[in-house]
């Protein structure tokens, strides 16, 4: 092992850490470490006797974790918020190093490999998201990982998982993992620590605890639009696929049951063979897939899975690990935006992280295909490839357009959405518009003539049409604006008062 190589990689890590912290501080004050600002403000509110779940930060964010979590932040309010903002990125980078050391120990990896793992983690999108928002997610992953791997003294195993679950509920899946692997005492200690933390929250914050456990914890919509691209859980992907509210719960429950059972079954097998780091990461990936909300900063588990695949034996698993690592570092929807106009392709790219974590859970680092004969591997690989090609080339229905939005009267004053002035309209047309293309979406803004009663948009043939609101602008014209991932298969109909189609537009060329 080259000492110079190890020192060089840690130097790269240090430079990347400094640059990342600097980029955080270059953000506007109101957008810097926004989640940390929420934690800090909520802890102050509790100290002043105000209801925890009525608190809304200056940036508009509410506190969404159990009451025990805010108790952990109370001592931090003794520091000025600026001092905490300086310390938090450093603590986040220290957690990255600790994760790399833990994974390296589980793999019996060299010091060079540990440094490489730390560098890969730091530049990944989930860790950068933790840094940017001042999130606790990376600390939750660290607690659950070292506990599930058995890196803490035997008599305390399970306690860290219980405490992590008392801050965010998703690590409770590790209790099931302890049970299926016969670690009964670890499961009991985890549940005991979780219950004790919840009891402490109830003792010190009785009203807030009652409110959280009887309703607030189920109000997942409090933390944002669950159909947005940032939510890469299975539920988020299904919502973007356009499933109806009536169908969604059943489909989601069936898929999550299958994904969770597959992950736990394979984790049990890995644990039996002494592969505790892979088993723990697999269970962590299942929490990302199963949770109704899995923002980018939750997905550290998927990055760890990618690195474990890169470190595995077999060219296919290593190649899959490299692809997954790229997916977790780059935004494919942005990078490959111009390669295809198909909405199916765009949907595939923009849900790549959801599909990646589900694939890891089902395959279990390759465990699901161990019964396939070596000479038979081209068949399943070809079947998967064919399925992806079909999805990529399919013009999905309107509901599967993950970036679609029709703007309302509240957006009229925003020049980014309403940029086409009535003075530029060409007379004699029922509808006149301009198209602007951005990195991940295309916007259409225009005006309509007096005879137009409504506008109807379909993202693809056969898709359910959507109504585009007609709004009266400050200049008195009736304007409209909407965005879509792709306009290649789109159709815009202008309707008369009796529903007759006055004009149809299927060609949308961005302005030069």
Image (cartoon, helix red, strand yellow):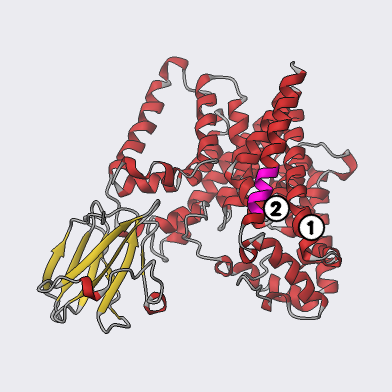
Question: Is 394 left or right of 210, judged from the image as shown?
Answer: left
Horizontal arrangement in the rendering, residue 158 relative to residue 481 (left or right): right
Magenta segment: does it hold 19? Answer: yes
For the residues bearing labels 1 and 2, Cβ distance under 8 angstroms: yes
For the point 66% across and 34% down, the residue is 119
Q: Main secondary structure of the magenta part?
A: helix
For the N terminus, which image quadrant?
Answer: top right
Q: Does label 1 or label 2 sit earlier along the sequence?
A: 2
Above or below — where is 378 with respect to 328?
above
Is 290 on the left-hand or right-hand side of 244? right
Q: CA distance from mark 1 to mark 2?
A: 9 Å
Where is 438 relative to 500, above or below? above
- Residue 436 percent coordinates (x, y): 31, 58
| Magenta range | 18-24
Residue at image position (79%, 44%) is: 184
Q: Is residue 413 visible?
A: yes
Q: Which mark is residue 194?
A: 1
Pointer 1: residues within 10 angstroms few (<14), some, or many (20+)? many
Report the residue marked by disc 2.
Answer: 172
Place of residue 455 in the rendered image (x, y in percent of width and height, measured from the top left): 22, 72
Secondary element at image label 2 = helix
**Residue 479: x %, y % from top left:** 27, 76
Which residue occupies 25% across, 63% down?
434
Q: Position of residue 239 (x, y in %)?
A: 43, 59
Answer with the quarter of the image where residue 433 lies: bottom left
């Amino acid at each position: 092992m080259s000492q110079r190589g190890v020192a060089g990689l840690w130097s790269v890590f240090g430079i990347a850490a400094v640059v990342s912290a600097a980029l955080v501080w270059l953000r506007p004050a109101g957008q810097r470490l926004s989640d940390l600002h929420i934690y800090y403000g909520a802890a102050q509110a509790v100290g002043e006797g105000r209801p925890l779940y009525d608190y809304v930060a200056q940036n508009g964010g509410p506190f969404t974790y159990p009451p025990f979590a805010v108790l952990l932040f109370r001592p931090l309010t003794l520091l000025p918020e600026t001092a905490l903002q300086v310390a938090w990125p450093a603590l986040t980078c220290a957690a990255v190093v600790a994760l790399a050391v833990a994974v390296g120990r589980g793999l019996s990896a060299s010091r060079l490999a540990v440094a490489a793992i730390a560098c890969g983690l730091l530049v990944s999108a989930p860790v950068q998201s933790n840094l940017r928002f001042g999130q606790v997610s990376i600390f939750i992953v660290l607690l659950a990982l070292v506990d599930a791997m058995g890196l803490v003294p035997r008599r305390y195993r399970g306690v860290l998982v219980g405490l992590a679950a008392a801050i965010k509920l998703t690590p409770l899946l590790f209790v099931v993992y302890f049970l299926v692997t016969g670690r009964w005492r670890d499961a009991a200690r985890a549940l005991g620590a979780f219950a004790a933390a919840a009891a402490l929250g109830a003792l010190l914050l009785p009203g807030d605890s009652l409110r959280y456990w009887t309703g607030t914890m189920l109000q997942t919509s409090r933390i944002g639009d669950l159909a947005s691209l940032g939510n890469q859980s299975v539920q988020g992907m299904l919502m973007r696929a356009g499933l109806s509210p009536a169908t969604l719960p059943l489909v989601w429950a069936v898929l999550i049951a299958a994904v969770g059972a597959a992950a736990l079954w394979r984790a049990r097998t890995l644990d039996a063979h002494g592969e505790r780091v892979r088993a723990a990461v697999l269970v962590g990936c299942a929490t990302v897939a199963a949770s109704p909300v899995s923002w980018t900063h939750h997905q550290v588990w998927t990055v760890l899975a990618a690195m474990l695949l890169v470190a595995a034996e077999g060219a296919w698993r290593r190649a899959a690990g490299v692809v997954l690592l790229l997916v977790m570092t780059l935004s494919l929807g942005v990078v490959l935006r111009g390669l295809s106009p198909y909405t199916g392709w765009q949907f595939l790219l923009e849900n790549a992280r959801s599909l990646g974590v589900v694939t890891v859970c089902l395959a279990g680092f390759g465990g699901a295909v161990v019964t396939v004969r070596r000479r038979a591997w081209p068949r399943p690989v070809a079947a998967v490839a064919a399925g992806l090609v079909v999805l990529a080339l399919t013009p999905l229905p309107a509901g599967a357009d993950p970036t679609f939005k029709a703007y309302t009267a509240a957006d009229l004053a925003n020049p980014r959405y309403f940029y086409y002035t009535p003075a530029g309209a060409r007379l004699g047309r029922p509808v006149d518009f301009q198209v602007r293309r951005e990195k991940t979406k295309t916007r259409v803004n225009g005006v309509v003539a007096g005879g137009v009663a409504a506008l109807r948009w379909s993202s693809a043939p056969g898709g359910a049409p959507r109504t585009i609101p007609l709004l009266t602008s400050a200049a008195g014209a009736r304007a409209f604006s909407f965005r879509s991932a792709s306009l290649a298969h789109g159709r815009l109909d202008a309707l008369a008062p009796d529903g007759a189609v006055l004009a149809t537009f299927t060609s949308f060329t961005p302005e030069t």
